[in-house]
Amino acid sequence: MVNQAIFREYDIRGIVGRDLTPGVARILGRAYATHLGRFDVGEVVIGRDNRDSSPALAQAFSQGVMASGADVIDVGTVVTPMLYFACQELAAGGGVMVTGSHNPADYNGFKLVRQGATIHGQEIRGLYDMIQEPAFRQGQGRYREENVTDQYFHAIVQRIRLGARPLRVVVDAGNGTAGAFAPPLLEQLGVQVVPLYCESDPTFPHHHPDPVKPSNLKDLIAKVREVKADVGLAYDGDADRIGVVDDQGHIIPGDILMAIFWREILPQHPDAPCIVEVKCSQALVDEIIRLGGTPIFYRTGHSLIKAKMKELGACFTGEMSGHMFFADEYFGYDDALYASARLLRLLSESQETLSEMAATMPKYDSTPEIRVDCADEDKFDVVMRLAREFKQSHRTIDVDGVRVLFPHGWGLVRASNTQPALVVRCEADSSRHLEEIKEEMARALSSQEAVGALDWEG
């Protein structure tokens, strides 16, 4: 029996031994290969992260794929962007990354690729429907192994040439998969790397590999200050998300990092569509407008944003969570190692430090991204009711939940795509106005019986 709850918006994910077993992985492989057969895709690249459960799950998934007639190309232990790269490099229409990403050590999962795009939403849920009345394709696919590390490194190094300024970089892999790849790649680019927790250990003994949470960056901040580094770089468990600490030990949020990248990209692509995730700061919006661009608000979710980029022909965007998508000089998928290289190029060519670059951004006071308990069966209805109420008295942006526009700032409520919760964030041009917006958002949330307690400290 396969648990329906593991079929999420962006991936398949669950607890090892309870939701995910080799038997479940094999069934998933059969369903996935059968689904690919509808698109005449017969070759699947499979990679895995460094978690203890990943080899067995990858092997079982591979067996399922081959039992449904598709060939398997096993690229071994890699980070997720290397799996995406391998799909392109090896001209394979299918790809599977076995990874728990930033989730706790007892989790694992599957990120699925079809013809160059990560599948999401109904396409993932359709695999569950197929398993309920299985009519899997029959066949016997072939198996081979490939190592794409050298080609992947070459693809980045040939695109990135650093300037004259020498750089010292602290790399914190959180004992995740990036530890095997980030230091040697960045050293090939010509920077001095100070490794931190780059040894593989899927128990994550020092801190969890999730760079969005400030508590996971404390050791990186301390090491940057200790060695007087130019920048600190952190990665999630499969290195599709980046976290950045500047030379003073201050965290650079994802939206400010995007604004820094837009300063390089938008002058070279003045007509580029500028997709802005709905959670992002007004500072990013202001900077895009200052550079001559037009912000386009869009939904949260790396699969959704990649699809929107292709639709609009966008050359760059990102997410607050640290996904960065470069399509101007790269492939357009989220690759934290390539994003690192782009940031290092900026720093090596500039007389400004990273802290000086960030200091020139517009300043706003904001809350962290708050998650408030709300059951899956209630959360979307709650957001719809709140959106209707706010629209009666405020301007709103409703592309993903509701971003309520106040005279001096904004407040956001949206349904989480990954857990039974609402996502809440507020921002304003002063601490006083921020408190006023927080009070109004709190009043609206407290009026909904299905919503749990709101803690602004996160």
Image (cartoon, rainbow, N blue to C red):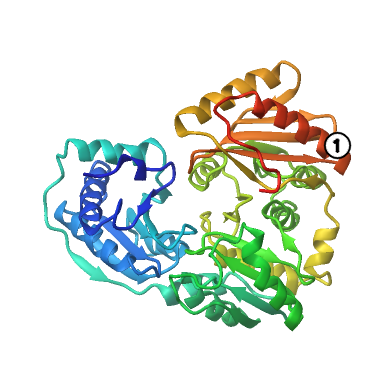
- Where is residue 2? Give x, y as percent: 25, 44
Q: Is residue 428 left or right of residue 91?
A: right
Residue in view at x 50 percent, y 40 percent: 417
Residue in view at x 51 percent, y 44 percent: 310
Instruction: List the single residue furthest toward the top.
Output: 392
Is residue 430 shown to the viewer in this render? Answer: no
Which is more toward the observer, 193 or 37?
193
Residue in view at x 33 percent, y 58 percent: 16
- Where is residue 454? Give x, y as percent: 65, 38
Q: Is residue 326 above or below residue 1?
A: below
- Where is residue 114? Give x, y as percent: 35, 48
Which is more toward the observer, 256 or 23?
23
User: Callout 1: helix, strand or loop?
Assistant: helix
Which corner quadrant holds the N terminus?
top left
The residue identified by callout 1 is 433
Q: Amino acid at mark 1?
A: His
Which is more toward the observer, 156 or 32?
32
- Where is residue 340? Give x, y as percent: 62, 67
